[in-house]
Image: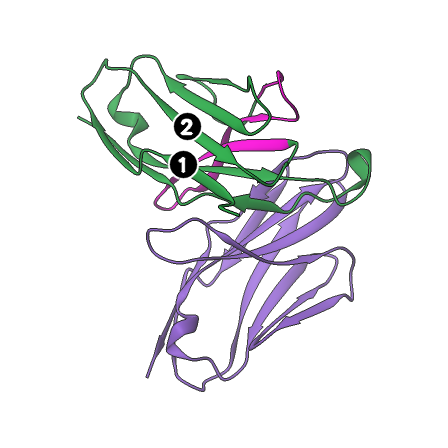
Chain colours: A green, B purple
């Protein structure tokens, strides 16, 4: 059981370049999330998905797009990278502890991708 | 707006010196409060979920408690391997999303 995996681990981009970060989970979780973590800012939610084929915006969605074509994968795209997107990106997945919105959603995180945009 | 504030930002302890980390929160309706541990260069690792005021949970040298306004993570007789950043997060009723605090960096010296 690998849990949540992310590729790549490190990447350096030039301003204006594009890239896709891949997140995969083998726990059969319904929900998946993309966060960015910056010093002093904590974890901020970019986009999330509550099931295959669905996506929704989080706290800081501008400049990012996502897709969830398969239940186990969640992709984060940067169409035109900017220096402000230099950050560490984490993917997480979760399942509800009971049916519907009454449950809690313990999230399990991947190891992260360190992205630098120059 | 849901908010989580953690204090102190950083804490330095000697091995065996017990202490507590604080997580204050404001949320429209609390569904759950979560504690995570994060080691440098790694993703957060889930520790505990607390659901209601008065609840306590323990794991090895860690004990988490919850009141209506804050949570404490008590570390008893810490060891150097407990050094990490500890994150607190809340989930509001009716939402699948978590709101995270900025964490407390704990350093335990031998």
Q: Main secondary structure of the magenta part?
A: strand
Picture residue at 34% right of the left edge, 56% below the top? B40
Q: Seen in the image, is A64 located left or right of residue B26? A: left
Picture residue at 80% right of the left edge, 42% below the top? A98
Q: Seen in the image, is A43 located left or right of residue B59? A: left
SS at circle 1: strand
Magenta span of residues: A31-56
Rendering quarter of residue A39: top left
* Closer-to-camera residue (A9/A90): A9
List the residue tagged with mark 1.
Answer: A6
Taking the magenta stretch, the answer to whether it contains residue A104 is no
* Closer-to-camera residue (A54/B8): A54
SS at circle 2: strand
Q: Quadrant of the C terminus of chain A?
A: top left
Taking the magenta stretch, the answer to whether it contains residue A43 is yes
Percent x, y for residue B76? Answer: 54, 81
Above/below status of B4 relative to B85: above
List the residue tagged with mark 2.
Answer: A22
Extreme-bottom residue of the structure: B16
Percent x, y for residue A2? Answer: 48, 46
- Rendered image: mark on residue B41: none
> Answer yes or no: do the residues labelled 1 and 2 have beta carbons within 8 Å?
yes
């Amino acid at each position: 059981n690998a849990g949540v995996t992310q590729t790549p681990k490190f990447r350096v981009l030039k301003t204006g370049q594009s890239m896709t970060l891949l997140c995969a989970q083998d726990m059969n979780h319904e929900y998946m999330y993309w966060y960015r973590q910056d010093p002093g800012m904590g974890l901020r939610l970019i986009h999330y998905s509550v099931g295959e084929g669905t996506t929704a915006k989080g706290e800081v969605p501008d400049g990012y797009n996502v897709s969830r074509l398969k239940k186990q994968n969640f992709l984060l795209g940067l169409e035109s990278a900017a220096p402000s997107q230099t950050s560490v990106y984490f993917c997480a997945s979760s399942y509800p502890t009971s049916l519907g919105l009454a449950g809690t959603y313990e999230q399990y995180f991947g190891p992260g991708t360190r992205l630098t945009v120059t | 707006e849901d908010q989580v504030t953690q204090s102190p930002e950083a804490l330095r302890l000697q091995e065996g010196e017990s202490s507590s980390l604080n997580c204050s929160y404001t949320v429209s309706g609390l569904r759950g409060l979560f504690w995570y541990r994060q080691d440098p260069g790694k993703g957060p690792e889930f520790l505990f979920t607390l659901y209601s005021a008065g609840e306590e949970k323990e794991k090895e040298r860690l004990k988490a408690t919850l009141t209506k306004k804050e949570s404490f993570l008590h570390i008893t007789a810490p060891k150097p391997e407990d050094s990490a950043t500890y994150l607190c997060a809340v989930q509001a009723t009716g939402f699948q999303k978590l709101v995270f605090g900025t964490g407390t960096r704990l350093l335990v010296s031998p």
